Amino acid sequence: AEVPSRGDARADAEVGSIVGPAWSWRWQAPELALVFGERALRTADQRGDQLAGLWAQTLVVSASCRLGQQLAVTDKAIDALRLSERLADDAAGAILRVELAGCARSAGVPLVGAGLLRPVLSATDIRPAVRAAALIQLAGCLAYSERHRELDGALAEADQLYADDAQFDQDTRLGLRAVLRSFVAREHRRRGDLRSALHAAEEGANLLVGLSDLSADGG
């Protein structure tokens, strides 16, 4: 799940100065992004700034999910989603719905996750990378539906959306597309198609070779 740029957050300047740069750390250094997100959240709470607090909480949720803490952060994500609805912040709400879909998958209720994604996938003004993340989550939620053609189409669209998102630098685009290939490889393994799984894994490795900063793959 990717997030909008710092300017999209429209947050308080002090909190924004913390949250903005931390977005880019969610993949390479999610632990650091989490620390800064929690710091920004405390600052927003002290100032009574709900909008800044929403985006700080969104960062906390997103970084936590990158660290595999989906179940631990579910309640925070739900509270943040409710706040985004009260503040009519559709951008934050879309990101939170994507992360909550991953939480639902982790909890063993993937169809609940698929339902959470409907407003994101039906939106017409959503950032390409957020739609891409939603498509990947949808494919995960419906992995056992045997709707292989639809799932493959969703993943192919996600790859193109990542490739076309001009708000990313080249290394971020390559890294996200490589991560996507790992998901594709896992899906092919689940179906018993080992040749396609190997091909997807090789594509991912080849994408990483193109990084200008080899530390950008986050390990």
Image (tube, rainbow, N blue to C red):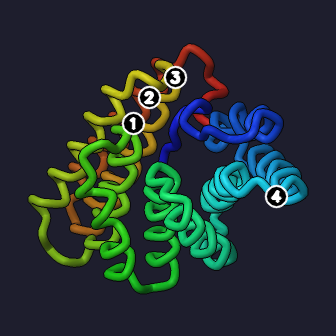
210 up-or-down from 135: above or below: above
Q: Secondary structure at mark 1?
A: helix
Cβ–Cβ under 8 Å for marks 2 and 1: yes
Where does label 4 land, which residue? 48
- Residue 174's x, y, as percent? 44, 28
What residue do we see at 43% from left, 70% from top?
101
> Closest to the observer: 126 or 83?
83
Camera-nearest label, 2 or 4: 4
Where does label 2 land, which residue? 173
What residue do we see at 71% from left, 49% from top?
52
Identified by mark 3, the residue type is Asp
Q: Secondary structure at mark 4?
A: loop
Is residue 122 left or right of 45 when viewed as pictured? Answer: left
Is residue 189 left or right of 91 when viewed as pictured? Answer: left
Q: Residues within 10 Å of mark 4 (few under 14, many from 20)?
A: few
Tell which circle, 1 or 3, labels the residue nearer the N-terminal end.
3
- Mark yes or no: residue 63 visible: no
Camera-nearest label, 4 or 3: 4
Measure how far apart labels 3 and 2 are at the Cα level. 5 Å
Quarter where residue 27 is shown: top right
Quarter where residue 129 is shown: top left
66 up-or-down from 69: above or below: above
Where does label 1 land, which residue? 177
Is residue 78 left or right of 132 when viewed as pictured? Answer: right
Camera-nearest label, 1 or 4: 4
**Quarter occupied by the C terminus:** top right
Measure how far apart labels 2 and 4 are at the Cα level. 36 Å
- On residue 171, which mark appears? 3
Q: Residues within 10 Å of mark 3 (few under 14, many from 20)?
A: some
Cβ–Cβ under 8 Å for marks 3 and 2: yes
- Residue 190's x, y, as percent? 29, 68
